[in-house]
Image (tube, coloured by chain):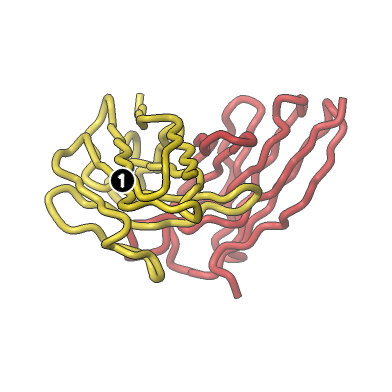
Chain colours: A yellow, B red
Amino acid sequence: GAVVSQHPSRVICKSGTSVKIECRSLDFQATTMFWYRQFPKKSLMLMATSNEGSKATYEQGVEKDKFLINHASLTLSTLTVTSAHPEDSSFYICSARGGQGGRGNQPQHFGDGTRLSIL
Amino acid sequence: QKEVEQNSGPLSVPEGAIASLNCTYSDRGSQSFFWYRQYSGKSPELIMSIYSNGDKEDGRFTAQLNKASQYVSLLIRDSQPSDSATYLCAVKIQGAQKLVFGQGTRLTINP
């Protein structure tokens, strides 16, 4: 149980392109999803918290107009990197909170990540 | 002081031995604690969750929580080369939705 699917797994595109990444909870409902990015050999960095039916909460220093998040249903959140540039190249990972445990104790389950390369 | 601290390693352990990973946290009101394993180039995978003081065992893994001392640890018995990975400690801080992650400990099991 508690499977999170992330798509696509890898994107290579030209500078200026907008890229959409999907995150789905397959066997549970996730009112809250999270988006992270990770540079090689570095720690996970939380970008934003996505709540179903409301605006995402962005971490300090993350541009909300650059990284558009939509959480339109209890099983799907999307991250759109708008007008991507080479410095946006990174490993983007989503997670969804759900599974065993009380509402406040449920662990986060991660998708497989999306490796984004901007040429 | 960081909210969640781990020794970045690398920690080298011979195959078959016990690997011990430690984590300390600063928020005394934290209630939920998690260990994730992350292989190079992959996303984190949940290994253990623990919510009460004491030990919790799952196969070769044992999580230990001591809220009074504000530390949580992960023991891996009979370590295997496939256990070589970065282990992330994560804490759900009171009143917050998000998890706070430590920087991770890189573990290498030597055959």
Q: Residue drawn 20% across and 48% down?
A: A70
Placement of the N terminus of chain A among the 4 image quadrants:
top left
Is A35 positioned to the left or the right of B110 in the image? left
Height in image: B93 above or below A88? below
Q: Which residue is mark 1?
A: A18
Is B99 positioned to the left or the right of A68 in the image? right
> The residue marked by circle 1 belongs to what chain?
A
Disc tally is 1
**Of the pair A35 and B56, the residue shown nearer to us:** A35
Q: Secondary structure at mark 1?
A: loop
Amino acid identity at mark 1: Ser
Q: Residue drawn 33% across and 49% down?
A: A81
Q: Residue drawn 45% across and 35% down?
A: A12
The image position of residue B63, as x and y in percent, is 60, 42
**Of the pair B81 and B62, the residue shown nearer to us:** B81
The image position of residue A17, as x and y in percent, is 34, 45
